[in-house]
Every structure is written in structure tokens, then in C-alpha cells.
Amino acid sequence: MSEQRLTARIAIVTVSDRASRGEYEDKGGPGAESWLRDVVVSPIEIDRHIIPDGRECVTVKLRELADNGADLILVTGGTGPAPRDQTPEAVMDVADKELPGFGEEMRRASLTEVPTAILSRQTAVIRGETLIITIPGKPSAIATCMNAVFAAVPYCLDLIGAGRIETDPAKIKAFRPKGA
């Protein structure tokens, strides 16, 4: 495990054929960035990317970002049941370890708001020293999902040797065991 960085590097990847062609305004990427900037109080660098749907394209981008030092990657889009929705498969292609509790909790939280949340295939994985989490594309759904799971993210990053994240405890109280 490498020494923990004080500025966390975060990548937000929007997966959308239409947004990547400029036919549709990306709302997921800006929504995820806004949520992070509202909750995280420690130094962070955020880079946003928009790529087309499809397993190979997503796999290549995630591998590139993780292997070049992203601590956290949030992937918005491509997690539904439509034929081109292959983000979960791409995420598994790059995974060293799966963290299924993230998807379970995001679906549970989302089901209190919309019955179609059961169609979501959210997940999270670790690749090296990078945590990758798939999230919805709608800003309100992003907030629901991030509010449900983000308390565990800072300690997960600590455990894998990624950059350190501190949250505003009035918004999200990050959990770290005593002494961590």
C-alpha cells in the first residue's frame, strides 16, 4: 500500500451515446460533481469524461483512469436493462474485488422513491488503489444513492491506499473506526 495522498483524485465518467455525440446534455456528470463539492471538505481534484455506451469503451476508460491514479471513479449511466447498457459488465472486466453492498444499498434507498429502481444494476469494485462506483444519471437519484453509501467511501479509500477524503459531518458523517 502506498502512502496516502492528501488530495484525492476523482474521475466522473458519464456513459451515454447521445451525450458523447453532443445530442443530449449531460446532467449526471455535473450532478455528481456538485454533490461531491457540497459534501467533501478535503482537497479534491475532479475530472469529468463523457464516453459512448458499450462494454469495450467503458472498460478501456476505466482501466486508463484507475491505472493512472484516480482514487475514486464515479460512473453514471449504462446500468439499466437496455441492450447498450453494459457499464456493470465493463466495471467487472476491470475489477480486482467486487463490493456488492454498494449496489444493494443504492437500490434499497432508490426503491423508496421509484419502483423502477429494481431495474438498476448499480455496483462497486476495487481496481488496485481505486474505488469504482456506478451511480444513476439523474441528479436527484445520484443524491439518493450517494447519500445512502458515501459514509463508507472514505474508510474504503483508506483501506485500499487511495487519497484521503473528509466529509462535512453535517451532510455525510463518514465512518472510520476509532484510531483510523
Image: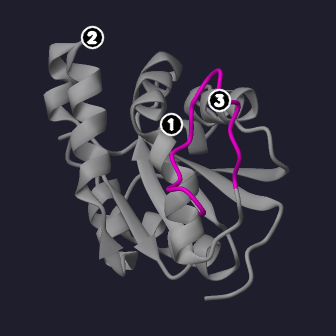
- The one of 17 and 158 positioned closer to us in this rendering: 158
Compared to residue 53, the image places residue 150 above or below, namely above
| 78 horizontally vs 168: left or right | left
Q: Which residue is mark 3?
A: 169
| 27 horizontally vs 94: left or right | right
Q: Secondary structure at mark 3?
A: loop
Q: Which residue is mark 2?
A: 113
Q: Main secondary structure of the magenta part?
A: loop
Compared to residue 67, the image places residue 85 above or below, namely above
Q: Which residue is mark 1?
A: 18
User: Which image quadrant: the N terminus?
Assistant: bottom right
Residue 179 in magenta stretch: yes
**Distance from Cα at disc 2 to Cα at disc 1:** 26 Å
User: Which image quadrant: the C terminus?
Assistant: bottom right
The residue under the point 65% across, 29% down is 169
Residue 88 in sight in this render: yes
**Distance from Cα at disc 1 to Cα at disc 3:** 37 Å
Q: Earlier in the sequence, mark 1 or mark 3?
A: 1
**Circle 1 residues within 10 Å: few <14, some 14–19, many ≥20:** some
- Mark in front: 2 vs 1: 2
Q: Earlier in the sequence, mark 2 or mark 3?
A: 2
- Mark in front: 2 vs 3: 3
The residue under the point 75% across, 33% down is 37
The magenta region covers: 165-180
- The one of 139 and 167 positioned closer to us in this rendering: 167
